[in-house]
Amino acid sequence: MLNKLKPAFFLMLTWLLIMTGLPYSSFADDLHYKNMIVGDRPASMGGAYVAVSDTPEGTFYNPSGLVYSVGSNLSVSVNAYHNTWKKYDNVSGIGDYTRKSSSIVPNFFGVVQPLGIGKIAFSYAVPDIIEEDQNQSFTLLSNPGKFVINRSSIDKTYKIGPSYAVKLSDSFSLGATLYFHYREEKLNLNQYLLFFSNNAYESQSEVSRKTEYGVNPKIGLMWSPLDKVSFGLTVSKVDVFKSNFSKQVINRTNITNSSITDNPEPVFAYSKNKRKHPISVSAGVAYFPSEDLLFSCDIDYFEAVPDENKRAVANISIGTEYYLSDRYALRGGLYSDMANSQPLKRGYTDQADYVNIFGITGGITRFTRTTSMTFGFNYASGEGEAQPVGGVTDIYKTDTRALTLFFSGSYGY
Amino acid sequence: MKKCAILILIFALLPIFCLAASAGDSTQNYRLRASDKTHKVSRNDIKAEIRFGKEVAARILGKFRLYDDEKATRYVNLIGKGLASYSSRPEIEFRFAVIDTDMINAFAAPGGYIFITKGTLETIDNESQLAGVIAHEITHVTEKHIVRELNIRGSDDSALSGLSSVLAGGSSETMRAAFMQMVDKAQEILFEKGLKKEDELSSDRMSVILLGNAGYDPSAYSDLLKKIRDTEKEKKNIKVVSSTHPDFNERLKAVSKTIETEGLTDVQPANTKNRYIEYVSF
């Protein structure tokens, strides 16, 4: 076993520390609120749907809009292919650190029916899903060796539940959704550092899992004070009532003064701390100048959550829909997805990534008498700063890109 | 605490919003998109309408007996068929029946199934007034008021439609359940809620024009509305048409305006009072 290490490599060894030292939540994209845009029509329109919401997706955006759904029964199903790419530039001078994610997921399903004086709906939504993989090998030049990292993580959020909406007057409606909220995060991380000259090595293997159960009530209002104009407002909050976290780590090394302790037995950690979520308030306006054209704009505000070190965020989205004929419609939108983390401060360590993201969406829909099919896309990108190396004050440039392709169908009867 | 206060404030303002929310388009028809509007009616749509109407008619007959007077029923059918020949829907075969209830009302199911109550026949004085009631119900069918309200339409046999329905989870069992739900909804419209005010006023206007085209006295419809209004005041124990229709004064105003604008003030129709008495007696 070596009992002496060159200072230049101390930095390398701290890498093995960072993965156990950083908060678990930083591995998922917990740093933004608009990771996937739910639904068919909203996803093509940048998510600007609070003042429209007259289709089953209204359960997610503004349940009060359900009273204006056309037809007695509707069903919408959206299947999405979601792909993200994240890069940290030239970390510690040895190379770009890259993570990729790709998943195919049913993103939304909803049904609306009349019931009593209003409409009842049931829906299932997946607002976020990340399955990241990182498999990289770096060659160390100054003291010949290699560093290998294999990382696989999953972060999925599911919402399922009923909605009900009623008309309170000719131009005012009220609705509510009560979602059951479930989130699952898993991490599988293996790192290995080897110096060729003396076969000194350090390795770390970590497996962790976190599950979160809660409720996500949403209350929505819709108001139409003018002809062809609609205003919408939705208030929403996730409350977690149960959370379980478990982690298992195995550290091995043959270096005497290593920062990790050699132990063939796994070390376990558990926690039941419940994550705090912000209250979100979304306000929107929609203008329907004709049966062929629609414009909408939303502002989504999320309050700060000091306990989670999250700042207040406001996102804006705008969308439009244009009917080429009664059989084809084109939709487009733009949106912002601002970071809820704090801007990085110089001289500090272990700060969460800070990346503001902007996106563009589009879609085309083909209608028949009772059905429709949509093909669309959502492309988002952003640049910012990050500290992927723990325990040091170095800040690196990072950029992220995400592409979602979705294919959906709806049926009215 | 601050968050709670904001939420409480939002919901305390709700009643004020409700009271203030009287402007704007009450129907919100502006939300209908180009794909929602029925531009071309297919044979399947007509079949679906007739099938739906048959089911609704069966529900009406389940609720009320037929009035056992063959002479009166034949008379009503003759008047009805004559008026229907002037209507804009030759593909619909209109059928008329009298139901045995003292209620003063008439019902039109999609597909041309029209019911007039015994109570209405007792209130009517002459054939023109009877024609007015029948014309009003015929126009509910020709203008597809219930069909549009419930979005009744035929299926599409295209491959794209089949794929969409599979993707979105529609099945025949689901469709059957949905169909029965819509029949319940139609019953609720006919007996409790009534159609939209603009649909009723539209039928009033169009029935006056239909009367004029068929050679009846258009002002007889106004006379009938006044008579029913007066009957409602006198006989409070009888369920009257106003429970499912707009205010009489508003209807009378609209009918009067239509007679004037359509140039029907100078029509000199035949006196049909004696023929009415001959066929309808109690």
Image: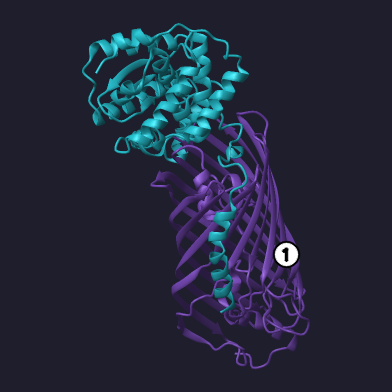
Chain colours: A purple, B cyan
Left or right position of B247 against A40: left
Determine which quarter of the picture holds residue B1: bottom right
On the image, the x and y values in percent for residue A149 come to 61, 70
Residue B73 visible here? yes
Please give the name of the residue rendered at 46% of the width and 41% of the height, measured from the top-left corner. Answer: A74
Q: Nearer the viewer, residue B127 or B191?
A: B127
On the image, the x and y values in percent for residue A134 come to 61, 64
Q: Nearer the viewer, residue B136 or A153?
A: B136
Please give the name of the residue rendered at 50% of the width and 80% of the height, measured from the top-left corner. Answer: A249
| Residue A247 to residue B259: above or below | below
Residue under circle 1? A356
| Residue A411 to residue B60: above or below | below
Quick one: quadrant of the C terminus of chain B? top left
Q: Secondary structure at mark 1?
A: strand
Left or right position of A324 against A106: right
Q: Badge 1 local density, few (<14 within 10 Å), some, or many (20+)? A: many
Residue type beneath disc 1: Asn
Residue B187 visible here? no
